[in-house]
Image (cartoon, grey):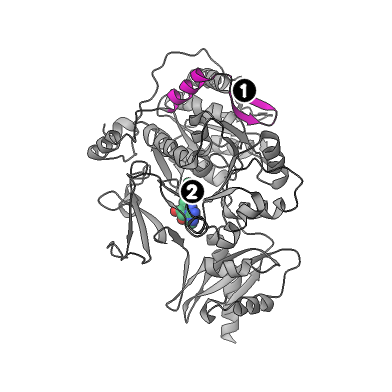
Amino acid sequence: MTDDEILPGCPTWPAEFAERYRAAGYWRGETFGRMLRDRANAHPDRVAVVDGDRRTTYGELDARADRLAAGLRGLGITARDRVVVQLPNIAEFFDVCFALFRIGAVPVFALPSHRLTEIGYFCEFSEAVACITTDVEAGFDHRVPAAEVARRVPGLRQVLIAGDPGDSGFIALEQIDGEPTDDPGPRPGDIAFLQLSGGSTGVPKLIPRTHDDYIYSFRASNDICGVTEDTVYLGALPIAHNFPMSSPGTFGVLHAGGRVVLARRPSPDEVFPLVERERVTMVAAVPPLALVWLDAAAGTEHDLSSLQVLQVGGAKCSEEVARRVRPVLGATLQQVFGMAEGLVNYTRLDDPEEVVLTTQGRPISPGDEVLVVDDGDRPVAAGETGHLLTRGPYTIRGYYKADEHNAKAFTPDGFYRTGDVVVEGRAKDQINRGGEKVAAEEVENHLLAHPAVHDAAVVSMPDDYLGERTCAFVVPRGTPPKARELIRFVRERGLAGYKVPDRVEFLERFPRTGVGKVSKRDLREVISRELVPELGKDAGR
Ligand code: OOB
């Protein structure tokens, strides 16, 4: 199949690789449409999705996806049409996904935190024919930017609202309905959707994932993570993000015939009662969220004993935090190091404790090729730090419509340059302080050990003399301690002088990315915006 037969602008695997991945049994010719139909046929009455009081069975989800697909076709949405989908953690998310998958239309998964700039960009760049969003979520009226986008993007023919369209003039998703037809639907090699890169610079790039490659990633994840039809998975992170979607996430759990429970917000007051009521067995968090749960779990009255696995990923989980998981929650920690572009690593549930606490795991697939290279793309010696490159049966060969960027982000032989610095099984986040490398997480661990520190993030600040110095941002627990006191505390723990933070700043909370990771990029911006001019002033005196 050539690129253009799939979706123009989507680089894909060379034929020899596709053949290899099929022969190895990774790609089995599955599609999302078929996957749901099979589950529904096997056990129509089992509950697939729980959203508040609404419980949707596999049979109902399958039937709704069919009718919604027919209704959307009636609005003129056809195979390969892009549709920007921005929904919170509500049951309609799955109705919409599976309806679009059945048509072969291509959802572009935006996050609830995206605003006019991002939604406008996704619609424009993907030449979307429709946008599906919600009414008011977390105090924000999504119909307002949607109206603006509809004005700006001429090709955008429809805006659909899950919930109340109000006086926006848009159509309520609820009203979309039609008689199911016998459409053959997309092929396994077709693009199923466009996912967003977690990209730390600029607007996210769009990641084309096929039915075959994506389904493989969560089917294999299910095996590693012990997901079965008995799994009750809580979607607490925004479910359009790759981590809670497919590692193994909601899609993995639906593939296994398990149950997905949705939390509208990830706060303990919403999550803990749900865990208790639904007997949740598995949940995924980014590190800052895991930290909030751990703090709240210590004093909770809710019964969290059903929890078997807490997955932490998306950013480095500090060892201090990792160590608290079993004693506080009674659950097994699983570290997850993944990326929407593909490669996902897991610590295994039966790995030795030290491996679980101190590594970010190993790849899903024997077909994953992983290289750690120096600046000249030469493999580094074992145990050395380097850049992580990867290629494999569920890692893309290029971003959507991004030829120029792809030439830099992928090697000539198709390895994705992840932009991550690693040393065998461990992600690195380093500050180069005049040639002395400071591992951010090491310093963060020491800071986290202080009773008055809730969270800590160490980032580089530009420095004329050393190139970079370290700035520790700290979210205090209650009254902030003195910066001096923290510095003394870290020093007394026997840390080398160059690792002691050059500066300590207190924040009430950290800036976050759409999925809730601490945004170190924004923290560095705080430095250049607010702290560096101040430093410059000092230096000039
Ligand atoms: C996940 O996906 P993205 O696309 O939002 O972000 C990917 C990037 C990675 O390249 C890496 O820089 C960072 O996030 N990351 C981690 C990490 N997991 C992700 N850095 C250190 N330790 C980890 N455990 O974030 C994502 C996708 C699927 C599963 C899990 C996470």
The quarter of the image holding the N terminus is top left
Q: Amino acid at mark 2?
A: Asp
How packed is label 1: few (under 14 Cα within 10 Å), some, or many (20 or more)? few
Give the answer, above or below, for where 35 lies relative to 244: above
Q: Amino acid at mark 1?
A: Glu
Residues marked 1 and 2 touching at CB (< 8 Å): no
* Inter-mark Cα distance, 1 to 2: 45 Å
Residue beneath the point at 51% across and 36% down: 227
Can residue 204 be seen here? The reply is no
Is residue 53 inside the magenta stretch? Answer: yes
Kindly tell me whether mark 2's CB lies below 8 Å from ligand 1: no
Mark carried by residue 350: 2
Q: Which residues are magenta?
A: 32-56
Between 314 and 304, the residue placed more toward the observer is: 304
Can residue 136 be seen here? The reply is yes
Q: Secondary structure at mark 2?
A: loop
343 relative position to 306: left or right: left
Q: Position of residue 90 (x, y in %)?
A: 62, 33
Q: Position of residue 214 (x, y in %)?
A: 41, 37
Mark carried by residue 174: 1
Mark carried by residue 370: none
Between 200 and 237, the residue placed more toward the observer is: 237
Kindly tell me whether mark 1's CB lies below 8 Å from ligand 1: no
Between 358 and 377, the residue placed more toward the observer is: 358
Q: Which is more N-terminal, label 2 or label 1?
A: 1
Q: Secondary structure at mark 1?
A: helix
How packed is label 2: few (under 14 Cα within 10 Å), some, or many (20 or more)? few
Give the answer, above or below, for where 54 lies relative to 271: above
Q: Position of residue 282 (x, y in %)?
A: 58, 41
